Amino acid sequence: MNPEPVAGARPATPSPIELIRNGIFAENPVFKLALSLCPAVAVTTTVLNGLIMGVAVLAVQVLSSVTVAIAKDLIHPKVRIPVYTIIIAVWVSAIDMVMAAFAPALYAQVGLYIKLIVAFAIIISRLEVFASRHPVWPSFWDGFGMGLGFLLALLAIGVVRELLGAGSIAGVSIVPFKPLLFFALPAGGFFTIALLMALFNAIELRRSGGRMHSSMESGHGH
Amino acid sequence: MKWDLREVLRITVSMTVACVLGAVVLGGVYVGTERYRVTADRTRERAAIQDMLDLPADATMLEVRQYLAVAERQVRYRVATMGSGAEGPATELAFSLDGELLRLGPVTGPVPPADEPLGRVWVASQAGQALGFVIEGESRGYKNRIRFFVALSPALEVKGVRVVQHEEDPGLGAEIATPWFQAQFVGRTAAEVSRLDVTRDPMPEDWYAAVVALSTRGESPEYTRLLARERTLPIHAVTGATISSRALTRGVRTTVDHFARRWALIAPHLGGHS
Amino acid sequence: MATDPKQAQTSGCEGCALLSGSPPADCSSGGCTGAKPNEPAGGRGPLLMALALAALLTALLAGAAIMLLRAAGVAHADTVAPRIVTAHVAPPDAIALRFSVLPGDLSPSNFRITPADAPDLPIPIVAVEPGEGGRVQVRVGASLSRQEGYRVSVRDPALDWEVRPSQWSVLLGIFLASALIQNFVFTRYLGLCIFFGVSKRRDTSLGMGVTFTAVMVLNGMVAWAIDTFVLRPLDLGFLQVLVFIGTVAFMVQFLDTMLRKTHASLHQRFGLYLMLITTNCIILAVPLLNAQAASGPLESFMLAIGSGLGFALALFLMSCARERAELARVPRPFQGLPIAFALAGLFALAFMGFSGLDFFR
């Protein structure tokens, strides 16, 4: 796969599959871009919490991308950031209300974090980088890919934390005891992400033969 | 960056349009989901009450909403038969703070906004026979508030406790919502509950087994036998979640105590409703 | 190295670069470091300090005024000598009253004690024990808590008093809770993007911490005012998110413009942080939490300043640790963010020690 997929530099609009793969791997919001980390630790105590959060982010991302792609000619460039923010805030509030109505038990656990989706840098940056320059359908797929990457990352963290912390996955008990309750705590969340990120990096190191994506380097002379 | 008036105007207009559009969209979503949420909530509550009291299908239910009218120094109760759709006609009882009945008659208007809600109670009965009560309560937990239902038998013994909403940590505070923790309350009288405390001592093995058996099978002769020994002893806290355990116990204690005393006041006046 | 601006755009600090308008080259070294490398460390920000102080003083003055008014109001309408001078809970099961002159009738039937939220349910009184200097201990048959409110009334002479946990203890409790016990970074896991981006060096951490606290307090109070006086009375709760992000954006923009006009060097130093604040979860979480709890102005202020200082503390601690980590031999896959997360995990573990901290029980 192209090691540095760059959205704006492609000569033609990428295909849906490419966009989705981009969102999951090369530009995975949580593990690669390290954006929108707040919920990644907070809601992944169980798989279901991570699922509902991931679905919410996916929905907001897709809806916002499509809205911006449709309305991009109506948005004045000087105020595009505030307008993007308004669009995102509207969709977040709408998704928040819908979830509160249809899944109240799960929503109660993550309610505050769903409202905070509006502060995610990932969503607004996708709007700026992609949706404002591409037509509706590619924007849809880009948003979908990013959202899917986010959802899968949350699910991965959630599986590790729930399995180790509570001995179950999505409420289904796998082992009858709690192996390492530590992983259900915030500290455990941080460690889980550290390990998964390192795993991601290790895989990429091996695939690219020692060249790592520069955003992850600590900057030795700094 | 040079700005000219027309451009500024254009920007202002477009931003205002965006905001207004957004607010309208949200208003629409709110209206739609709110209606659904209210009916979904009521259905869920009814199902929980049915389950906790093990009610037959043709049981009637009264809903008693309690309010505190601070300025007028009254406690008011609105009683209505809980139908599957809208409520039936509601009766209002007003008591002074000393327990004197001030008013008993049909409800004349909506609840004044200054009245503080004190929670709801559901009274289940069938053919004039009381089947039990379910009281909703709330207390402050480790993270945020914990909402729960307490089910009482007609003789005011605990039939069950169910945590309806909480934000406690999974694996720790969230364990108070597990059936086995909640089963510890079952069978205690109102008097015993009003003195209920929490201990961090480990649970005796046989008591734990009995409690789990009760919560999974719905009944357990072991539980009934050991209850005689355990009923005056405190609730055993969840390891690592003392605050949450105490919060729920304190909430149940306060809720049952308050209900028992208020029910003694209003029960004689509700004869016409069973 | 990101010499290609387009590549840098897709690197980790896309959002930061976008919102701050800084050149993409600043993002090349793995996160928003904030100040440029050869920027002199240290230096005060007098204007920002002044802003923060002004906010603090205004809030304190307002709070004092409110409390005075409240105290005056609580001095009850129908007091006839003797009157109650003060009352407080004496755990585990008594309330200590102090009268100006002892009432004639000290029998239990002359007194009535009820929980504040259930004034129709009096707590049974076991004994009334008079003491010196107008003091009376009323012992009850239940356990009382200093965290709860109670209402004490005397029948003859007709007196009323509300025993409440002291305002300052409540406020201090909120402050400690938001700064330490439920630290927004280590316990509630909010504000992580900015946290990991900025905590690489001590001076940038301090800069961000200061800016953040100031903006947090101002924004928290503005958001509280809007919620209390506009959203709640008109039942527009569903517009909360939209309105709060609006106030944040507006506040940040306003401060940015003001700084740029008045103090250009300060703007160069703190400007980037200001922009980053817009995407910080905490700045939105505090108004939401205040709205959820329907807090008063003082409680909201305490939550805002507590969270700001807690965030600053977390940043500072993290930056100290990360500066050390840069000198350590970290395995390749762990370099950069993963080791930072592991450090944060260790801090979170340490902060767990604060849970259950309670001075006032």
Image (cartoon, grey):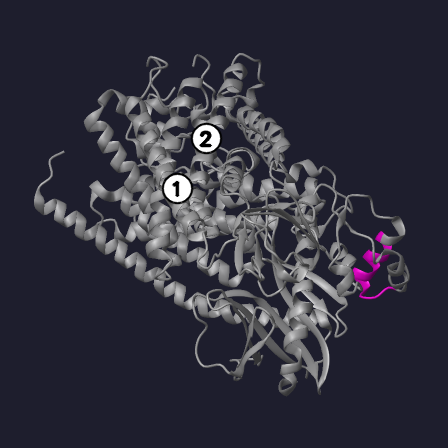
> Is any atom of residue A33 visible in this view?
no
Q: Which residue is mark 2?
A: C309
Mark toward the viewer: 2 or 1: 1
Q: Which residue is mark 1?
A: C63
Disc 2: host chain: C
Note whether C342 is above or below B159 in the view shown: above
Disc 1: host chain: C
- The image position of residue C270, as x and y in percent, is 32, 25
Total labels: the figure holds 2
- The image position of residue A50, as x and y in percent, is 56, 47
User: Regarding mark 1 in the picture, which secondary structure is present there?
Assistant: helix
Q: Nearer the viewer, residue B253 or A196?
A: B253
Separation of disc 2 and disc 1 at Cα?
A: 20 Å
Three-letter residue code for mark 1: Gly
Q: Residues within 10 Å of mark 1 (few under 14, many from 20)?
A: some
Res A4 → quadrant: top left
Q: What residue do we see at 20% from left, 41% from top?
A: A78
Q: Earlier in the sequence, mark 2 or mark 1?
A: 1
Three-letter residue code for mark 2: Leu
